[in-house]
Image: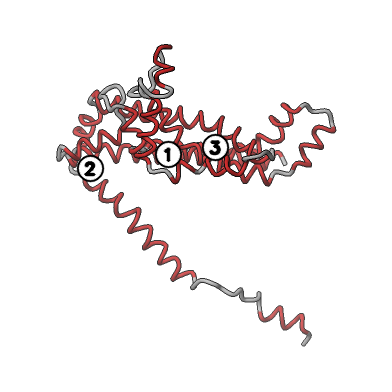
């Protein structure tokens, strides 16, 4: 029997596994996710289930809760859109240009990750308060940032920027620039090269980073409560409403609001994933 026949009969070569087998690692994965994610979420759902559906609507349809949901969702969406534009610009500069201080600027992008959210909120409030460095310049112009919804948007933009930059940056770095040179050789202008060659490749990563920034903004608490002023019906966000309900020992109502926010987040994540899948299929279909 030849060596080829022996190799064929012995089957595919066994790959050395660094970690334990599938059963053990899968068990650890399910256990960890169950303890950290599934059980707390199940507890919130079970607590909210004590109220009938009619009571759910009564809790959610109060003007204060509706205003908080409207502010949280719209401010998070606005912050995600701002970060999508300027995060792409920052990633482009850090990837395509070499200049003095680039590494320092690159490190500053991660500052919202390292900075405690309460410290970020205090810093932003100090900066944009009516007597702050920027606030005293903007106030005479009729632009009030601190203790307004605009302050909420700025705080959410601050904490969400790294998600967009760090998601787009590696994709932009791995992009084959030969395609750009070929398009330029064929007479395409820089704007057309960016729109037809570069942007379609970056779009899935840009959507992912913006979705991560949006999800983080929806649940943000520490950096917002100081600059928002927490005025009911004006600058109060959903996490603060939940905390207020807990302080008033209204645990079931707090669970109802939290579960509703969770369901909205899941629905938005599903829409984002569906959009990403559609873009990937469209991109593959053009090849």
CA separation, marks 3 and 1? 12 Å
Q: Position of residue 67 (x, y in %)?
A: 30, 24
Graded by Cα atoms within 10 Å as few (under 14), some (14 to 19) or many (20 or more), the crowding at tag 1 reads many
Q: Which residue is mark 1?
A: 215
Residue at point 55%, 44% (across, down): 107
Q: Position of residue 27 (x, y in %)?
A: 40, 67
Element type at marker 1?
A: helix
- The mark found on residue 48 in the picture is 2
- The mark found on residue 207 in the picture is 3
Element type at marker 3?
A: helix
Element type at marker 2?
A: helix
Residue at point 42%, 43% (across, down): 115
- Asked if residue 241 can be seen in this view, the reply is yes
Would residue 235 be found to the left or right of residue 197 on screen? left
Graded by Cα atoms within 10 Å as few (under 14), some (14 to 19) or many (20 or more), the crowding at tag 2 reads many
Mark positioned earlier in the residue sequence (2 or 3):
2
Mark nearer the viewer, 2 or 1: 1
Image quarter for residue 134? top left
Mark positioned earlier in the residue sequence (2 or 1):
2
């Amino acid at each position: 029997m030849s060596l080829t026949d022996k190799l064929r009969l012995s089957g595919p070569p066994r790959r050395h596994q660094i970690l334990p087998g599938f059963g053990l690692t899968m068990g650890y994965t399910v256990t960890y996710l169950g303890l950290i994610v599934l059980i707390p979420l199940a507890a919130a759902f079970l607590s909210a289930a004590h109220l009938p559906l009619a009571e759910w609507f009564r809790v959610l349809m109060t003007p204060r809760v509706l205003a908080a949901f409207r502010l949280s969702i719209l401010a998070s969406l606005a912050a995600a859109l701002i970060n999508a534009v300027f995060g792409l610009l920052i990633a482009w500069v850090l990837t395509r240009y070499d200049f003095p201080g680039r590494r320092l600027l690159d490190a500053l992008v991660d500052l919202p990750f390292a900075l405690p959210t309460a410290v970020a909120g205090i810093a932003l409030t100090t900066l944009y308060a009516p007597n702050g460095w920027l606030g005293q310049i903007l106030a005479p112009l009729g632009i009030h940032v601190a203790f307004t919804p605009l302050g909420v948007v700025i705080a959410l933009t601050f904490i969400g920027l790294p998600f967009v930059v760090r998601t787009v940056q590696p994709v932009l770095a791995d992009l084959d620039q030969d395609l750009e040179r070929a398009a330029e050789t064929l007479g395409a202008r820089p704007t057309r090269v960016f729109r037809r060659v570069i942007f379609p490749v970056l779009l899935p990563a840009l959507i992912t980073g913006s979705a991560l920034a949006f999800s983080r903004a929806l649940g943000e608490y520490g950096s917002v409560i100081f600059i928002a002023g927490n005025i009911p019906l004006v600058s109060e966000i959903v996490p603060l409403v939940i905390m207020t309900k807990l302080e008033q020992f209204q645990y079931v109502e707090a669970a109802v609001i939290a579960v509703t926010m969770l369901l909205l987040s899941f629905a938005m994540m599903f829409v984002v994933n569906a959009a990403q899948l559609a873009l990937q299929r469209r991109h593959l279909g053009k090849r």
